[in-house]
Amino acid sequence: MKNIFLQKAKLIFSLFLLLSLSLVATLTTGFKVSAKTYSINSNYYGGSCSTVVVKNKVYFSVTETGTIQCYNIKSGKTTKIISTDGKGFYSMKKKGGYLYAIYDSYGGSDGSNDSIVRVNIKTGKMETLAKGSNFVIKKKTIYFTKTKRVTSKYGDGYDKEIGVYSMNLNGNNQKACNNVTLSSKSLKKIKTSKGTLISSGETYSDSYYSPKKLVFKSKNGKKKTIYNISKDKKTYSYSSIGYYTLQGNYIIYKTTIKTKNNSTDGVLVITKTNGKGKKIFYRRTSVSGW
């Protein structure tokens, strides 16, 4: 009986010792925080433009224009919020009374100089929050890829990545986040509470995807073809859908239109998820990046 008691006591002591050592190791190395991965493009595909749909308004920016404009879905009117000398605003997101975005201030098409900014929707005033790119907003925190502007041995400047950082919505309290990863991938499917926007097309390599068709699948499983390049006589068969997004009850996509002089115009089209109310709300001659 005494031996059994001693064996149980040794077992309990061994378990206690293991737990104690584990606690000491945790306190010594710091509490472990599970790694998090955030998608920087969870609701859109493409980088030639950026759009944010809020109720009956579409805030949008097109590459090489340096502007943010607002299209009123009900009135059909477009107003300008801000105009700059840079190439434009990318990955726009709305939070409160601001549009947060990556702003490229570079003056040419052979490089970039990115910063994370926010623009007051009412006044059009822009604030630079940090030197960086690839950002997401989670509640009151911005996670982003921090960069530093450096000069190469050839004399040209470029953005060097430092790592993933976090900051407040006003740009304060910047600190490194070793447990956070920001990912970017081509989204062939965009799923929201309204349904799923599905693209199909041609994949030429792991890094190049050419969307040709958009289909919306509602929550009840019903499918509606939103756009199909092969059925569009106003564009070229080799064209691709350069941008698309699903936001609320609206789908926005970018395609091209033939012109009389055999060139092409890039257009932004908005439609409801049921395919009704389709309308071109922006059109511009195709240039580099657009």
Image (tube, rainbow, N blue to C red):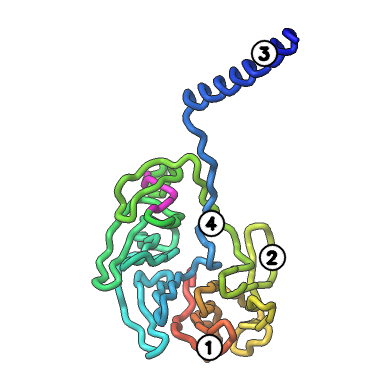
Say few, some or many: other residues with alpha carbon within 10 Å of mark 4 (under 14 / 14 to 19 / 20 or more). some
Tell me the distance, in whole angstroms, between the alpha carbons under discs 1 and 2. Answer: 28 Å
What amino acid is found at the position of numbered circle 2 in the picture? Thr
Q: Please report the residue visible at 69 percent of the width from the left and 64 percent of the height from the top.
A: 204
Circle 1 — which element?
Answer: loop
Q: Give the residue number, with chain letter if any, for mark 1.
A: 278
- Residue 1 vs 285, above or below: the answer is above
Q: Where are the magenta residues, as a range?
A: 141-150
Q: Give the residue number, with chain letter if any, for mark 4.
A: 39
Q: Please report the residue visible at 51 percent of the width from the left and 22 percent of the height from the top.
A: 24
Q: Is residue 148 part of the magenta span, yes or no? A: yes
Query: Which of the two discs, 4 and 3, labels the residue nearer the N terminus?
Result: 3
Q: Give the residue number, with chain letter if any, for mark 2.
A: 203
Mark 4 or mark 3: which is in front? 3
Report if the CB atoms under discs 4 and 2 are less than 8 Å apart: no
What amino acid is found at the position of numbered circle 3 in the picture? Lys
- Residue 278 vs 70, above or below: the answer is below
What amino acid is found at the position of numbered circle 1 in the picture? Lys
Tell me the distance, in whole angstroms, between the alpha carbons under discs 3 and 2. Answer: 63 Å
Q: Please report the residue visible at 59 percent of the width from the left and 20 percent of the height from the top.
A: 16
Mark 1 or mark 2: which is in front? 1
Query: Which of the two discs, 3 and 2, labels the residue nearer the N terminus?
Result: 3
| Tag shown at residue 10 | 3
